[in-house]
Amino acid sequence: MRALVVAVVTALALLPGSVGPANAAPPTLNPGSEPGSAREQDLVTTAAEEILASTAKGVAIAIVKPGMGPDFAVTTTYYFGAADVAANRLVGPATQFEIASETKTYTGALLAQALAAGLVQLDDPVSKWVPAPHTVPSLDGAVITLRDLATHRSGLADDPPNLGNKADYTVEKLWEGLDNAQLLSKPGSTWLYSDWGFGLLGTVLANLFMPNQPQPPFGPVVTENLTAPLGLDSTLLEIPTPDRAVGYNENGPAPYWNNTAALAGGGGLLSNATDMADWCRATLGIGLDPLAFLLPTELLPLAKGEDNKDGMGMAWQLYPNAIDFPVPYAYKNGGSSGFSSATFLVPSTKWAITVLSNGHDDQAVSTAARKVMTELAREPALPWTGSSFGS
């Protein structure tokens, strides 16, 4: 979940739709894939091959590109490998993956909604929503604001000191963690990635939209305000479902993240490739639904990014064009104990790619996704090569 680096990949034993030794055949598409042009297929297959050479057993990739007019998008989807090796279940259109920190883009969207409704201001202190007698730490006279939480500039550590098990981290433990917190930097001054900060933001916003609940209603609030309006039926809190993939790490099947309590806003959602494609489409502002007008505000620069370079939107890391990437782009990735994902958006040309895998290989996924997007973003889309259209 940090800066991208080139991953060192290692070989795996051959799995359905995946790769084994370096001289093995490229992975083949699973049923349910809706591929685009031959060039796009070649790029995606190479990306899947690189990811499956790490700990992942399966990969789902969705690409969004402009359609026939500004209110339409084309989505192509690709599925490779196994969702569950022991059950011989292949990755397909319904397969759900933990998206971990990509959940933060949904939390950012709730903030955008609260701002649009006049419920909050970006520079409101978060202490406004933390109940007495609990306190929020400050440093050198600077207090933590909603802007600071949304842009990783709160000074809070990555995890709270009293974390323990994410599934058992109640709202009371969240407030108690703030009572005892020592900030690592002055709020607003320095980019410091913080799951804690986004978990806090998610809880504050959930309580704002759905007050007087015994525990933060992050899941129901996301459903009511974001996923239901967009028809994202497979994007929900990490509850057991028949379509959820098994996560894998270097030692085999990995424990589920189970980030379903007061830190869920930092990384508690499941999703599938088609839902994530629609999320990308709306965030790029494609379509006529109200969220397509709202979500692009997440991509507005609100603060400096990592190392005080580039920029931060609401959860999205913003980058200028570079020698190896021809246009400015937004990026967010996610990684849990057995899942990795990455999403790239190109607002100027309305391209996007999202890659989901059931392996603990964040760098491999982000590097492969960036390679595909770098190549595809160099030229306009050819809408007639797409497989599915929608506004």
Image (tube, rainbow, N blue to C red):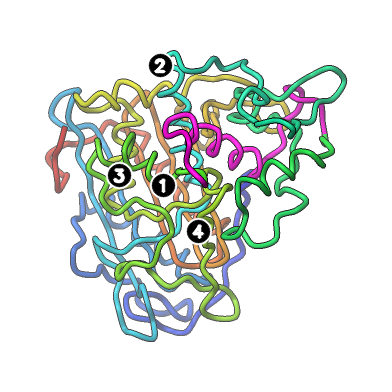
Percent position of residue 22, x then y: 48, 76
Q: Earlier in the sequence, mark 4 or mark 1?
A: 1
Report how far apart the C-alphas of labels 4 and 1 lie in the structure: 21 Å
Q: Earlier in the sequence, mark 2 or mark 4?
A: 2
- Looking at the rendered image, the disc whose residue lies closer to the viewer, 1 or 2, is 1
Q: Earlier in the sequence, mark 1 or mark 2?
A: 2
Label 1 amino acid?
A: Gly
Q: Say if 292 sits above or below 9 in the image.
A: above
- Looking at the rendered image, the disc whose residue lies closer to the viewer, 4 or 1, is 1
The residue under the point 19% across, 24% down is 288
Q: Which residues are magenta?
A: 185-214
Q: Which residue is mark 3?
A: 277
Q: Which residue is mark 4?
A: 340
- Looking at the rendered image, the disc whose residue lies closer to the viewer, 2 or 4, is 2
Percent position of residue 72, x then y: 17, 30
Q: Which residue is mark 2?
A: 116
Q: Which residue is mark 1?
A: 219
Viewer-closest of 78 and 248: 248
Report how far apart the C-alphas of labels 1 and 2 lie in the structure: 21 Å
